[in-house]
């Protein structure tokens, strides 16, 4: 995968359009599938790549553009010749390129692989099923279909995206009927599809015809609900089952809820972890639609994630699928009769209502909560040396105690100096930052962007720190930040509900985390020494 990223970065130097860079790299990988032609072109002494390259790519139904001047195409082919590129490597490359390198602005055209796997498990695609994937984008969902023998129809309004999706389908060995069209203006599609997967784009404007009743089944189109026209379109073509990715705000639309419940179309809602879609702070769910349902199954999968750089990554996909198949009331799921549904189809509306976990307010665990202070020396007297703590100084895990930069502050700052086992939270941001203070040879002062929690004991502090780092606690913090526009205050955090069991946490776990993190730091230092 690293080699593919390196080649992409090289191609970028000659191409302004990131889509075109993808096309060039994928065309070269496709060429490698034709061994004879690949070697013939690689052995050629011509400066320009042979015309047979373009003829071969075009024969696969892919529209090939001319390679840019100055691009050393032999360098690319020689690099590919040394490595066998597997479908898994292509999956990892596409995910890294599209969903992690957000600066390329390609993240709106792909679905995380884990969500694709969950969706396919739910759809239970069988031989001879007819599948529909509108707004297919890069076609990343198609990669997860495997070698299923089914008829697949995919659509997108962007011909370049279809070109790339067609290449990915060749890598995966899937036969797909691709079409370039605006689904709202294309009246030629009258098919019914056994299974549908749709990840609607969040677009500000849509080309909606005014007199199409099929697009107004949820009432008049609202610009803040761009998913609804796509859902309406898919429902016209639904035969058996469909899976959609929707923002949770969509699950509050009254006309949408009324239509689904009146027709018994809603089968399941799965609440997804926060912060899994780059550059999108909204909360998302998977919505499963089928016909003649008597009950709706709600699953809370918000804690099924790990941190992956700036964003979160879904884990335990099989556990989520097992929950879906079980249709049983458990800690993270509940089966609700249609007669009990309310004007809110979000998972939290049903699971929180039946959650009997004994909780206390965070303020009951603390002796003090205060914001970091800014002090300026005005007279140059009574100065002391101290460390100033910022969010960038937070240790990733364990005690934050290795602070380097110190400054002189007025001794009045000692009133607000941090103590060992104080917990620090970033006051702003989509992803909360958490630290617990360790031993220091100088007073530590938090800057104004930090909220300090002083627990009633060191044991309680460690238990709270472990909870905030856990998937459950971290999700609660993320929800709190999101509800308050990415900014919290002492008044907001003090009313956070904490399960009482948290205060009985395993303190040995904290010690183990500290020891593991020490080893990580040792390895990092060893790497730096090797490099220097």
Image (cartoon, rainbow, N blue to C red):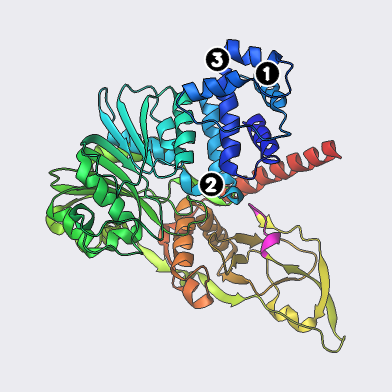
State whether residue 86 appears in this view: no
The number of discs equals 3
- What element does badge 3 sit on? loop
* Left or right of 200 on screen, residue 3: right
- Depth check: give the residue in front, 247 or 515: 247
Kindly identify the residue that appears in the image at 53 percent across and 75 percent down. Answer: 489
Residue 425's place in the image compared with 214, above or below, is below
Q: Earlier in the sequence, mark 1 or mark 2?
A: 1
Label 1 and label 2: CA atoms lie apart by 28 Å
Residue name at image x 40 percent, y 51 percent: 201
Question: Could you give the CA–CA distance between mark 3 and mark 1, rounded to whole angstroms?
Answer: 15 Å
Which stretch is magenta? 391-398
Location of residue 27 in the rendering, given as x and y in whole percent from the top left corner: 56, 27
Q: Quadrant of the C terminus?
A: top right
Quadrant for residue 130, please give it.
Answer: top left
- Residue 172 or 523: which is nearer the viewer? 172
- Measured as percent of width and height from the top left, residue 418 is found at 68, 71
Res 219 quadrant in image: bottom left
Principal secondary structure, stretch drawn in magenta: loop
Q: Which mark's residue is nearer the viewer, 3 or 1?
A: 3
Q: Is residue 305 magenta?
A: no
Residue toward you, 317 or 2: 2
Question: Farthest residue toward the bottom?
Answer: 379
| Residue bearing the label numbered 3 | 34
**Residue at far front of view:** 51
Q: Secondary structure at mark 2?
A: loop
Q: CA distance from mark 2 to mark 3?
A: 29 Å
The residue labelled by disc 2 is 106
Splitting the image into 4 quarters, where does residue 186 fall?
top left
Front-most of 417 and 175? 175
- What number is the disc on residue 82? 1
Residue 65 coordinates in the image, percent (x, y)? 57, 33
């Amino acid at each position: 995968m690293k080699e593919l990223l390196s080649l992409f970065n090289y191609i970028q130097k000659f191409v302004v359009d990131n889509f075109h860079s993808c096309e060039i790299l994928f065309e070269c990988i496709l060429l490698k599938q034709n061994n004879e032609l690949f070697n013939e072109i690689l052995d050629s002494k011509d400066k320009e790549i042979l015309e047979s390259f373009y003829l071969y790519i075009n024969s696969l139904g892919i529209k090939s553009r001319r390679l840019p001047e100055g691009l050393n195409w032999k360098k690319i082919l020689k690099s590919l010749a040394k490595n066998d590129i597997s479908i898994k490597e292509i999956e990892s490359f596409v995910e890294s390129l599209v969903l992690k390198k957000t600066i390329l602005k390609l993240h709106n055209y792909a679905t995380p692989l884990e969500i694709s796997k969950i969706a396919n498990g739910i759809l239970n695609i069988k031989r001879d099923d007819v599948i529909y994937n509108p707004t297919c984008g890069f076609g990343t969902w198609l990669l997860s279909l495997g070698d299923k023998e089914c008829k697949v129809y995919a659509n997108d309004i962007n011909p370049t995206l279809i070109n790339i999706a067609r290449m990915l389908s060749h890598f995966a060995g899937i036969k797909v009927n691709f079409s370039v069209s605006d689904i709202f203006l294309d009246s030629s599609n009258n098919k019914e599809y056994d299974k549908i997967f749709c990840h609607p784009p969040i677009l500000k404007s849509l080309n909606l015809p005014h007199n199409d009743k099929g697009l107004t089944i949820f009432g008049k189109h609202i610009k803040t609900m761009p998913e609804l026209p796509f859902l309406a379109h898919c429902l016209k073509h639904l035969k058996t089952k469909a899976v959609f990715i929707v923002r949770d705000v969509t699950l509050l639309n009254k006309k949408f809820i009324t239509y689904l419940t009146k027709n018994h179309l809603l089968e399941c809602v799965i609440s997804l972890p926060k912060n899994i879609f780059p550059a999108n702070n909204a909360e998302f769910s998977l919505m499963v639609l089928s016909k003649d349902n008597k009950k709706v199954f709600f699953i809370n999968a918000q804690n099924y994630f790990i941190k992956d750089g700036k964003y979160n990554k879904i884990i335990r996909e099989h556990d989520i699928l097992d929950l879906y198949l079980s249709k049983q009331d458990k800690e993270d799921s509940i089966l609700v009769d249609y007669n009990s549904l309310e004007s809110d189809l979000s998972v939290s509306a049903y699971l929180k209502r039946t959650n009997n976990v004994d909780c206390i307010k965070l303020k009951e665990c603390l002796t003090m909560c205060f914001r970091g202070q800014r002090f300026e020396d005005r007279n140059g007297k009574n100065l002391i040396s101290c460390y100033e703590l910022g969010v960038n100084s937070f240790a990733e895990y364990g005690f934050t105690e290795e602070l380097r930069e110190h400054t002189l502050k007025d001794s009045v700052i000692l009133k607000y100096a941090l103590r060992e086992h104080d917990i620090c939270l970033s006051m702003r941001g989509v992803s909360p930052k958490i630290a617990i203070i360790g031993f220091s040879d100088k007073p530590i002062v938090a800057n104004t962007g930090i909220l300090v929690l002083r627990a009633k004991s060191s044991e309680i502090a460690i238990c709270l720190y472990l909870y905030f780092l856990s998937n459950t606690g971290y999700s609660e913090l993320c929800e709190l930040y999101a509800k308050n526009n990415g900014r919290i205050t002492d008044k907001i955090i003090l009313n956070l509900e904490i399960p009482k069991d948290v205060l009985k946490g395993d303190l040995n776990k904290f010690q183990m985390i500290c020891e593991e993190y020490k080893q990580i730091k040792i390895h990092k230092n060893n790497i730096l020494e090797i490099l220097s």
